[in-house]
Image (tube, rainbow, N blue to C red):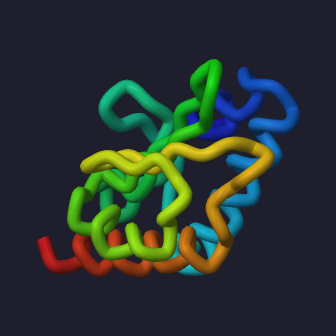
Amino acid sequence: MGAVDDYFSSVDATTAAVFERIRRALLEVAPEAEQGMSYGMAALKVEGRPLLGFRAAKQHLSIFPFSPEVVAAVSERLENFDLSKGTIRFTAEKPIPDEVVREIARLRVAEIERR
């Protein structure tokens, strides 16, 4: 198992299912993504660079695209979500739409490839 699998197994089943759905959507765009750690959280990586991190808190779930530009690019599609410079917060009851997750992956992979 890798860091992401380990993290998913440490959270409750509902949270793990939501994060797993996000991972599947990411892997549709970036099948080469590998499990790892970045900034102390479980993350998928492309070319050794962080693609997306996962974190569960008591009141919400979060994903971290590691890019303020990517969050800004999808912000209009996430109007009813809690966004900050590098974080998207949501709940299991109101998860991020798969098409937005795929767009996040496309944008972030493009950033990684440009570097």
Residue 65 drawn at (x, y percent)? 38, 55
In the image, is residue 56 above or below residue 110? Answer: above
Above or below: residue 7 compared with residue 29: above
- Residue at 35%, 77% in the rendered image: 107
Residue 80 picture quarter: bottom right
Q: Relative to residue 49, is residue 53 depicted above or below?
A: above
Residue 51, image x and y in percent?
A: 39, 58
Looking at the image, which residue is at 12% across and 71% down?
Answer: 115
46 relative to 110 in the view: left or right: right
The residue that appears at 34% across and 70% down in the rendered structure is 108
Left or right for 99, reference 51 = right
Q: Quadrant of residue 14?
A: top right
- x and y, in percent, of residue 70 in the image: 31, 68
Q: Outermost residue toward the front?
A: 80
Relative to 15, does residue 69 appear above or below in the rendering? below
- Count of labels shown? 0
Q: Residue at x 32, y 46 (%)?
A: 84
Residue 32 place in picture, x, y as percent: 51, 70
Q: Is residue 46 left or right of residue 82?
A: left
